Image (spheres, helix red, strand yellow):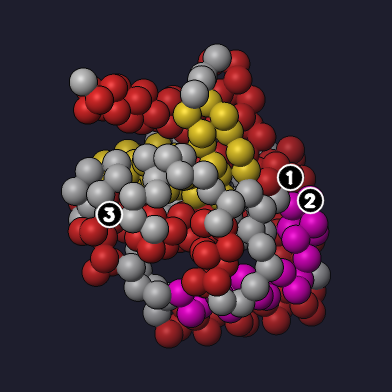
Amino acid sequence: MTTLVCLPGLLCEPEVFDPLRAVLETQGAAVDMRVLALPEGEDFDALARSLAAQIPDGAVLLGMSMGSYLALRIALTHPGKLAGLVLIGTNAAADTPDAAAMRGKVARWAAREGMEALAASLADTLVSPARRSDPALRARMIRMALAQGVARFTAHQKALAARPDQRGDLGRLTCPLLVLCGSEDGVTPLEAGRALAEAVPEGRCIALPATGHMAVLEAPQMVAGQVTDFLTRIATNTKEDAR
């Protein structure tokens, strides 16, 4: 059985992967799915080290949004640890100075206006236009944001603003890589995901139609199908290599 370790995104609780888990269980996938909460902290590399210590060798690591940035960092700083890597809504580049400054502004706005207001605002940008009025989706995003709180959100924004540019190291990534990008993702555009995958020896990028940045909530069936196929390919290649 494959161990699949999942890392949530910014303002996301482990429950963000519940729809994906439900689909995988319905499919009868032979997967031991584990979700790690992102620890609080302002140091991006320290966050990656803390998470890496909780991931068993030989696991497949899946990260979404902030979790994808951290997952890529773990894969690059711990060569040989992972059997595969799945990145959803990702970008290997660092923030531009303007983007980094905007993170600070958003954190200050959240401290002033509250996390519910922040989550409601983000729901209008993080999901595809067709899903922005979905009451259940918006309620889940608000619930997770409130659970995360202003202090954790502010710390994570600082970590993301200072994260390293990882594009120059992508050629060193030797494990198989699957990048999933929402075709309507305005946060991490499809072009960024494609560029990342193309720079990795065993990289592949797939666009998810009519999907925004929150693919694991918007399109869990599509995500599960692609992840299952990826895990099957890894298992098949491992068996062939063992012969």
Q: In the image, residue 24 lies at what x, y percent?
A: 55, 23
| Amino acid type at mark 3 | Leu
Task: Please give the residue where the numbered disc 3 appears in the rendered image.
Answer: 173
**In the picture, which quadrant includes the C terminus?**
top left
Query: Residue 40 appears at what percent x and percent y?
Result: 68, 68
The residue drawn where x is 79% and y is 79% is 112
* Helix, strand or loop for disc 3: loop
Task: Give 144 or 119, whichever is nearer the viewer.
Answer: 144
Depth order, front residue of 138/38: 38
Task: Examine the rendered structure and indicate whether residue 158 appears above or below residue 4.
Answer: below
- Going by the numbered disc 2, the residue's amino acid type is Arg
Find disc 1 in the rendering and name its residue: 140
Q: Which mark is residue 143?
A: 2
> How far apart, in angstroms, are the residues tagged by discs 1 and 3?
34 Å
Q: Amino acid at mark 1?
A: Arg
Q: Residues within 10 Å of mark 1 (few under 14, many from 20)?
A: some
